[in-house]
Every structure is written in C-alpha cells, then in structure tokens.
Image (tube, rainbow, N blue to C red):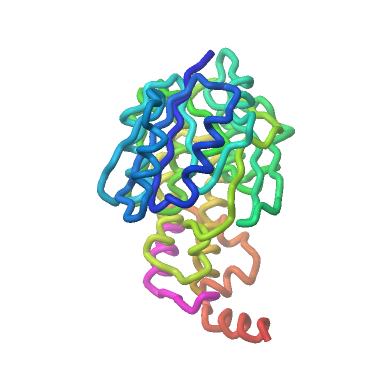
Amino acid sequence: MSRISIIIPCYNAAQTLGRCLDSILAQGFTDYEVILADDGSTDGTAAVMASYAAGRDSFITVSKPNGGVSSARNAALAKASGEWVYFADADDFLEPRCLETLVSQIRDGVCMVMAGYREVGPGGTVLQDYPASGFSPLDIDGALVELFRPSVLAYQGYLWDKLFRKDIIDGAGLRFDEDIFFNEDRLFIFRYLRAASGLVQSSTVPVYVKVSGDGAMASLGKGFTYKHSTDFEAFARMVSFSCGLSSKVREALLEGMCLSCRRALWQMVSTGTFSPSVRRRMLCGLRKAGAMVAWLRRPLKDHILMMFPRLSQLYLKLWKR
C-alpha cells in the first residue's frame, strides 16, 4: 500500500468544503492524510476545517495570509509526508473509488498515474465524462505531448485526475509558481514530468467530479485582467525549461502557446477589454520562444484577431445580432 497526501487549498469554501471532505471520508482506500490549507478565507472556511480535523489525526490544517491557490498548495506540500501526492479543489469532490482506482494503477517504474473525470453543473447534472483511454502506459515524451495535444481528454493540464510521486517533487525541489494564476497546474505537471523518469499509467475510470460554477475558470467570461494573462506566461516559462525536449514535444508545446495566445485575444475582444500592451507582450513572447512558425499555421481568423482586433469586435457584434 502507498500512503497518499491529499492537498486541498481552501479559500472562502465554507459552502462546499464539507461535501469535498465527506467524499474523502467515504473512500474505500484509507491510507491517506488530508492537508487543508486555508488561504486567508474571510467566511467560515476555517471553522469547517477545524470541525473535520477534530479527533482525526489524518487531517492537518494550515492557515496563511491570502496569496493565491499556488501559495496555498505550496504551504500544504511542505507538510506532506505521503509517498504520493493528490490534489483536490474545495468546490469539487471525489468519486467513491477515486483513491482505490488511482492506487491500483501503481506499478514498478510508474512515475505518475492519471484517470478520467466527470464535469457536472451546479445542480449535479452531468455535463460531460472525460475518460482517459487508448494510451496506457505512456513514456515521458508521450505524456508531455498529451499535456499539450490531448488525444482523448479535453484538458490534460488538470491536477486532480493524477497521482504524483513525492520523492520526484522533493528531489527536483518542485513548487507552484506563486505569480502564475492560470495554467499553473499545467506548468507544475510539465516541470514534474521533466524531472521524472519511467512511465505514466492511466485508467479509463472517472475519479473526480469537477463542478462548473463561479471558480477561476468562470471568471474568463467577465473580462480580461492581468491574472488571465499569466496563462500565456506559464507557457513562456515552460519554453524556458524546454532545453533537451524532443522535436515532437517542443512542437506540441509551441502549439499550446499559440492556443493560449488565441484564447487571450478572443477573451479580450469578446469582453470588450482589449489591451494593446498585452497583445504586444504576447507577440514578443511568441517570437522569443521561436513559435512564429507555429502561429503562422493558425487559421486566418486568428491572424485577424492579432492584427485587426477592432474588425474582430465588429464581427462579434454583428454575429450576436
């Protein structure tokens, strides 16, 4: 058996944290510790954490000033003592056999385990199942390509469908970049895989329920801010760590960087928050990364977004009518 450290960053999660923790207590696999990191909550989150930790040695609580999800995860990682690390979010919950399913995939030489997940609406309606299938096991290059060019899952950059080896995290001194607010999870996984060796094992079973609502991703439709621009910055940092990558992985990474640029441009245009300075920084970033060839392969509408944002805004207004 392999002990798991379950890390949950918590910020103003009083309404949902109990559901998440109940789903952990209902697991058949019980060799775990739960590390709850309160990121300066201003509601009753601390009280919920205390009530679940009372009388349970396997529950550890950490309190810190507000600094973002990455700083909360880092504070929890410093307390983790398990052989494997699992990340969950306080507004989601685990499927009943989550930990059992993930642990069942551990083999000699396996450096990471991943599985499927399920997305539901706030009322519990299943929006989509994302099973991981067709590529088990993967070598490191294969896993890195999947990180940027997923063949099955809609988004392989999530943390909460994966198990990570603690000795790899510690050996490489890995922590989350605290000034990256979007895409920080994919950046962490990229650096983890760069430090790892062996195989990535996967299961087709959904192990996690992602609840769509008012989280960080939901803010994308409300306007573009500096924090949103760190999605692209995360790709720039991955490029800075890309020395020695195979040509196939580097190509997939640069494609991902171009997609991030396109998402930012479209978000700025569609929410009426276009920033010429952000556009210039992204264009400079693409050039510095050597991604211009990949960008030139993008569809014509992406080039119009980049060069003629006002035209794209006009198109969007006409299309909405």
| Viewer can see residue 283 | yes
Q: Nearer the viewer, residue 233 or 224?
A: 224
Residue at 59% x, 33% y is 143
Going by the image, does 132 lie left or right of 140? right
Rendered location of residue 149, percent (x, y): 62, 45
Q: In the displayed structure, would residue 176 be above or below residue 281?
A: above
Residue at 53% x, 68% y is 221
Q: Nearer the viewer, residue 91 or 268?
A: 91
Magenta stretch: includes residue 278: yes
Q: Nearer the viewer, residue 216 or 197?
A: 216
Rendered location of residue 78, percent (x, y): 31, 30
Going by the image, does 119 lie left or right of 22? right
Q: In the displayed structure, would residue 18 be above or below residue 35?
A: below
Residue at 32% x, 44% y is 71
| Quarter the N terminus occupies | top right
Q: Quadrant of residue 99?
A: top right
Number of dots carrying numbers? 0
Q: In the displayed structure, would residue 102 be above or below residue 181?
A: above
Q: Which residues are drawn in magenta?
A: 269-287
| Viewer can see residue 144 | no
Magenta stretch: includes residue 63: no
Farthest left residue in view:
65
Q: In the displayed structure, would residue 193 be above or below residue 217?
A: above
Rendered location of residue 75, percent (x, y): 31, 37
Q: Nearer the viewer, residue 264 or 43?
A: 43
Main SS of the magenta segment? helix
| Quarter the C terminus occupies | bottom right
Rendered location of residue 9, percent (x, y): 40, 43
